[in-house]
Image (cartoon, rainbow, N blue to C red):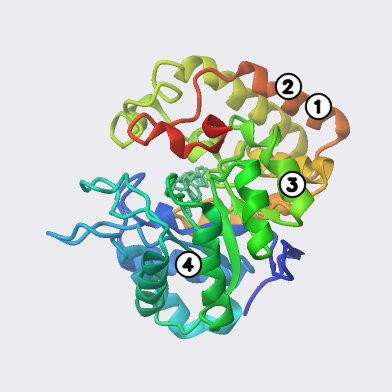
Amino acid sequence: MTATVPTVALGDGLSVSKIGFGGMALSHVYGGTDPDAALRTLHHAVDQGVTFIDTADVYGKPRDGSTGPAGTNEELIAKLLADRRDEITIATKFGITGAVGVPGAKAARGDRDYVRAACEASLRRLGTDVIDLYYLHRRQLDIAIEETVGAMAELVAEGKVRHLGLSEVTADELRAAARVHPIAAVQSEWSLWSRDVEARVVPAAREVGAGFVPYSPLGRGFLTGAMTPEKIAAGMLREEPRFVEHFAANQRVVELLREIGRENGATAAQMALAWLWAQGEALGLAVVPIPGTRSPERVTENAAALRVSLSPAQKARLDSAADLVEGDRNLTFMPRDWISADRE
Ligand SMILES: NC(=O)c1ccc[n+]([C@@H]2O[C@H](COP(=O)([O-])OP(=O)(O)OC[C@H]3O[C@@H](n4cnc5c(N)ncnc54)[C@H](OP(=O)(O)O)[C@@H]3O)[C@@H](O)[C@H]2O)c1
């Protein structure tokens, strides 16, 4: 029995649940996971009405000896799709050539042959005959975006993909892509502590009629207040300045989220999500955050953020939190030019 989460129109006629589920958190990235528990969390999300499920070919633990995209997160999600394909809007991505943590992972490819092969591989792993939303994850900078999006458009024409999306593109890249094929969604990092997209990419998304899917909407967990220095030290964020040397300074943002949360009977995580919807409304475009979690209870908590509203004064206090943030959003082990703002 599916509970009701409202749906919202992104672009190109694609309607999705107003909050999605970020599948990457079910892989090894932020901590260990058990596949059976992960599948239970996915079913719980769909039961709650969180039916917009986000994955990518690179997510998941690579198999021994494998150097290409791991594909194991897609294979996990295939188990959900096997039972409930009709209830779900499945989004996946291609363009990063290797699994996270494997040599070659930091290269991007967007030539036509690669686009077609990546799509076939994702369809096979997901066990479906059509991908609802297919994103370019990172662009190959020495190939024109028109070429990559042209190849993606062929997949739409062939019925393998329903809608196209782009991740971490600049405003100009987005405009160029939208001249080739309508773009349903831009997926880039956007949260209370990562607001660089608001300068140029968000206005361009509004202009071309694309919706926005903020990734890492909880600041990779930091904005929830649940991250301690010990937890950070045990995971992949242990060398990231924002999470480590600026931990104490950035706790001021968490404190503000908690304070406004107390006023609304809500958690810091719920405030971070409520701010994103309010900011989308202020900037005039559809916003669908995709928080990830291994925990069914947190899926419920995050979806319940839809019932919290911020007063204009609370929204303004949260807007000003950007001034408290120290350290930039780039992960030091990722190529610098994978952040769209750094290419503009
Ligand atoms: N396009 C891209 O390049 C890109 C990049 C990064 C991510 N993404 C997508 O965006 C999704 C979300 O981003 P993300 O996973 O990086 O970060 P996020 O959603 O901002 O945060 C995820 C972390 O927050 C914790 N969490 C979630 N809900 C919580 C709550 N209510 N209270 C306390 N902690 C909570 C989770 O831990 P627990 O598991 O312990 O709850 C998890 O470690 C990903 O899963 C992926 O699908 C896309």
The dot on residue 277 is 3
Whichever of callouts 1 and 4 sits on the residue coming sooner in the sequence is: 4
Q: Are marks 3 and 2 in contact (CB under 8 Å)?
A: no
Ranked by sequence position, the earlier of labels 2 and 4 is 4
Q: Are marks 1 and 2 in contact (CB under 8 Å)?
A: yes
Give the spatial CA distance, label 1 vs label 3: 14 Å
The residue closer to the viewer here, 343 or 272, is 343
Query: What is the three-letter code of the residue carrying label 4?
Result: Leu
* Crowd class of label 4 (few under 14; some 14 to 19; many from 20; radius 10 Å): many
The residue carrying mark 2 is 320
* Residue neighbourhood size for the residue with mark 2, other residues' Cα within 10 Å, grouped as few (<14), some (14–19), many (≥20): few
At label 2, the amino acid type is: Ser
Which of these two is toward me, 3 or 80?
80
Task: Determine which residue is flagged by label 1.
Answer: 316
Mark 4 or mark 3: whose residue is earlier in sequence = 4
Secondary structure type for disc 2: helix
Judge from the rendering whether residue 332 lies leftward or rightward of residue 147; answer left or right: left
Q: Answer yes or no: is residue 295 visible.
A: yes
* Count of number-bearing discs: 4
Residue at 30 percent of width and 28 percent of height: 233
